[in-house]
Image: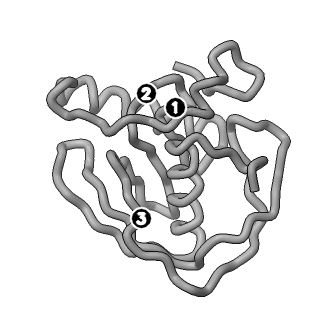
Amino acid sequence: MKIVTTKSENASILRQTMPEFDFSAHSPKEIKEVVKEMRKIMKLDGGVGLSANQVGLDWRMFVAQHRNNFYAIFNPVITRFSKGQIMMEEGCLSLPEVFRDIKRPESIVIEGYDQNGRKLKIRAGGTMARIFQHELDHLNGKLIIDF
């Protein structure tokens, strides 16, 4: 497993909307191993988030790390956005050395499932909200160069 960049042979996966993840199609062991590997890749490459399509998987999920909290969120949906927005520079592991100022809602509520298929609901603000929004953009085929 390695990071797909816009120059990779399989770069088209970065522009696709990822299908809903079906927990019944994968064993708990397989899911756990993928989450573990994605976390390792994200950390080794100095990232704070990584979506499944960034490693060539057509899974609707991402991993993220903020401070000491690690998240693996499957079938994420943002159910609430704040009115307040903040402009901030973002980078992306699939676009090495590209940075863009992007305006995003300051806080969100995201719902989905953890790696065990349990429902979760997270209120996120600041950097954590930005990371989640960035990764969800990936799952919808959007990159920071689209803003």
Residue plotted at (34% across, 69% down): 122
* Image point (45%, 45%), residue name: 63
Residue 118 relative to residue 5: left or right: left
| Disc on res. 53 | 1
The percent position of residue 38, horizontal first and vertical second, equals 47, 33
Q: Measuring from the top left, give residue 6's x and y in whole percent.
A: 74, 28
**Sequence-wise first label, 1 or 2:** 1
Identify the amino acid type marked 1.
Asn
**What is the x, y in percent for residue 106?**
58, 78
C-alpha distance separating marks 1 and 3 = 19 Å
- Left/right of residue 102 with respect to residue 78 in the rendered view: right
Determine the secondary structure under disc 3: strand
Describe the element under mark 1 as helix, strand or loop. helix
**Amino acid type at image mark 3:** Ile
- Mark 1: few/some/many CA within 10 Å (<14, 14-19, 20+): many
- Identity of the residue furthest to the bottom in this view: 84
Q: Residue tagged by mark 3?
A: 78
| Labelled pair 1, 3 in contact (Cβ < 8 Å) | no
Alpha carbons under labels 3 and 2: distance apart:
20 Å
Asked if the residues shown at circle 1 and circle 2 are in contact, with their CB atoms under 8 angstroms apart, the answer is yes
Q: Is 137 on the left or on the right of 146, as rendered?
A: left
Q: Residue at x 71, y 70 (%)?
A: 103
Q: Residues within 10 Å of mark 2 (few under 14, many from 20)?
A: some
Residue 27 against residue 129 in the figure, above or below: above
Residue type at mark 2 is Asp
Q: CA distance from mark 1 to mark 2?
A: 6 Å
Residue at the spot of label 2: 58
Residue at 47% from the left image edge and 34% from the top image edge: 52
